[in-house]
Amino acid sequence: MSLPPILAIETSCDDTAAAVWADGRLASSVVAGQRIHEQFGGVVPEHASRAHERLIVPTIQAALDEAALTIADLGAVAVTVGPGLAGSLLVGLSAAKGIAVGAGIPLIGVNHLEGHVYSVMIEAPRPPLPFLCLTVSGGHTLLTLVKEGFVHEELGRTRDDAAGEAFDKVAKLLGLPYPGGPPIDRLAAEGDPAFLDLPSPRLGPKGRRGNALFDLSFSGIKTAVRYWIADLGDETDAVLDAHRADVAASFQQTVVDALVTGVRQAVEETGVQAVAVVGGVSANRGLRAAMTEAGQADGFEVFIPDPAHSVDNAAMIAVTAATKWAAGEVSDLSIGATPSLAL
Ligand code: KG4
Ligand code: ZN
């Protein structure tokens, strides 16, 4: 028996998103990006919450229209409760509570990171449980073992910047726009990955330092790029113009190698043969290709969501909520935004 339709709302950072899950599949997914942050080279929290306030009702309406449904057709409303920016989360949470109270339907709070993890469940093929999940986004980089019953066992994480943050910071050093992942991805396809020898972000066993299975640090690679550029002196503009793609390719290759090597090792040590790669950085073409190749070489199966579901969206919140609702999990109307919620 399939559940009545669920409307999901996601406003944790700088994308205002709504989606509808109905009849066991995604019926609609709308993401309204916020261009305002480009001019600041990063997300300005105050601007983000104001933009969410402007965009939330039209975005929800667009998702309902695309699914050819009205609020009266909904069985539940789901919303991201954290982690994220407090003011941004509150806009989505208030909208969801208003709908829950007005329509007299249950509210389902969803952890944004859990949403990323279950983004691999939006479309077939879906991984079997348990699976290893590499979450690489703008705010988080961690490897978990995902088990039945929403159990997430952490195997390691970054000690400083997230992978997406490293892409954004290196892009800024190269004079590329925010967010930096997509332009680095595009440039890297044309550059020489052997141009610069950069320090690996890997710290774990068989890495350079550290002791957890999947310990990473992205501060060294970012600093190495910064110093390389600083040393160019008067030549900076000319060298960057000639080699921007080569630096992008070198950086991307080093990050991808570290992530892939860590995952291969985790597969070997846990014996788990299904690997999901989720979060904004999983939209990266280099990472998608390298992870798929590693899976073919080592015999594990790789599951990566459609690029539209790698970056922030509400479809992932909808599918997570559907699974929770099916398991009888609903939230109290008094739930609040939890900006620092862990997985
Ligand atoms: O998951 P996401 O949309 O938001 C967070 O939860 O953080 O991830 C955003 C991050 C940004 O740092 C962005 O630069 C990165 O994902 N990103 C990419 C690509 N597309 C987005 N990084 C590398 N290659 C891409 N194609
Ligand atoms: Zn995210």
Image (cartoon, rainbow, N blue to C red):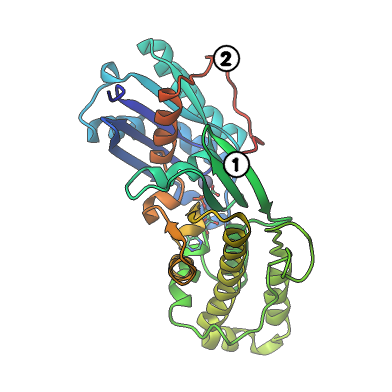
Looking at the rendered structure, the number of numbered marks drawn on it comes to 2
Report whether 286 appears left or right of 61: right
Farthest residue, direction front: 271
Q: Position of residue 109 (x, y in %)?
A: 51, 26
Of 90 and 260, the residue lying toward us: 260
Describe the element under mark 1 as helix, strand or loop. Answer: helix
Read off the residue under disc 2.
334
* Sequence-first tag of 1 and 2: 1
Height in image: 14 above or below 56? below
Q: What whole-number distance in Å separates the C-alpha atoms at marks 1 and 2?
A: 24 Å
Question: Where the N terminus falls, by quadrant?
Answer: top left
**Disc 1 designates what residue?**
45
Q: Residues within 10 Å of mark 1 (few under 14, many from 20)?
A: some
Q: Which mark is residue 213?
A: none
Q: Residue furthest left?
A: 68
Split into 4 quadrants, where in the image is the C terminus?
top right
